[in-house]
Image (tube, grey):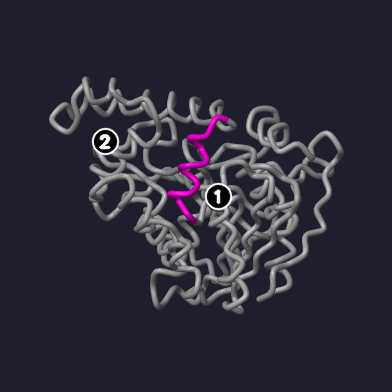
Amino acid sequence: MPVIESKYTPPFYFKNGFISTVYSGLIRRVSLKQERERITLSDGDFLDLDWSYSKKESSKLIILLHGLEGNGQRPYITGAAKLFNESKTDAVCVNFRGCSGEENRFYYSYHSGATQDLVEVIEHAIFNKNYSEIYLKGISLGANIILKYLGEREEIPNQIKAAIAVSAPCCLKGASEELHTFKNKLYHDLFLKDLVKRLKLKQERFPEMITKKEVNSIKKLIDLDNLYTARAHGFNDAIDYYEKCSSHQFLHNIKVPTLIINALNDSFLSPECYPVKKAKKNPNLFLEMPKYGGHSGFIDKANVYYNENRALEFISKG
């Protein structure tokens, strides 16, 4: 499909990508009642799912995936859940392995291309919860997972009707390079601090997998991806991980209506993360590139974000 012309215009002070990103990540608040369910995965690990419901019984469900070091209570996730609940759709906010407040059971955990856990959540929703209409929405890392999931396989369940990917790092190598630039030093250092803290806990539990010296040698995110992410999840190194897990290479094979919303002033995204050519060639792929919005910072009226309203509008038209 042709690229969609965006109508998003935020208040003046949120036209700055840094301000909109920081406000959305640190200041926004959303009140939502959630019920936690723990499911056991096929490998013996677990996922914690945070459910919220429509006032009336619904056969519709939106599955929401968070970003790097996020969780199912982040406002960019609960904001969408609340809006969909108000629109007669149940919501489940997935906490990736180790992101629910409790460390997962194994040395490996989650990464940008780990689609198998999403497969199991979808199967749980269909076979144990009996949802007949399912929508997918992911933010950042979660967006890449959804796009990769939809494009890497020839068949997906008929119950999946549409998907929305927001601030999607379709090219992981390019996005990594952007995160390592001076303009993103604050974000880089915050991510690195949290990830190294978590890796230190892993090292204490699995000293045979990684040494304290190796953990202490990590100075950049790419170091962590080389020493932990790639090794723990079966990749040769960080570059191999980025190449094999980038969703860009799978976009041509997406067969359900899918909307990508990537702001042009998103400092995390490289030029390759705006798949214009892919969108023009695939009738199921819709690409919207607002001028503003930063990284997941599409601030709008009444504490409902533009990308949340667009997601609801997109699936309603489908």
Q: Residue 134, position in %: x, y?
A: 55, 66
| Residue assigned mark 1 | 270
Occupied quadrant, residue 75? top right
Disc 1, SS: loop
Three-letter amino acid code at the position of disc 1: Ser
| Residue in the picture at 48% in, 49% down | 174
Magenta stretch holds residue 172: yes
Is residue 62 found inside the magenta-colored segment of the image? no
Q: Which residue is at 27% across, 45% downward?
A: 237
Residue at image position (38%, 51%) is 242
* Mark closest to the chain's N terminus, 1 or 2: 2
Taking the image as drawn, is residue 59 in sight?
no
Q: Quadrant of the N terminus?
A: bottom right
Please state the total of marks drawn on the protein image: 2
Q: Is residue 318 above or below residue 28?
A: below
| Prevailing secondary structure class for the magenta stretch in the rendered image | helix
Q: For the residue marked with disc 2, what is the amino acid? A: Leu
* Closer mark to the observer between disc 1 and disc 2: 1
Visible in this render: residue 255? yes
Query: In the displayed image of the protein, which residue is found farthest to the right?
Result: 12
| Left or right of 38 in this view: 18 | right
The image quadrant of residue 6 is bottom right
Please give the label number shown on residue 221. none
In the picture shown, does residue 267 fall above or below 55?
A: above
The quarter in which the C terminus is drawn is bottom right
Q: 252 left or right of 47?
A: right
The segment highlighted magenta reads 171-182
Which of the two residues, 198 or 87, is positioned nearer the viewer here? 198
Horizontal and vertical percent position of residue 13: 83, 34
Q: Residue at x 59, y 76 (%)?
A: 284
Q: Nearer the viewer, residue 303 or 147?
A: 147
Q: Secondary structure at mark 2?
A: helix
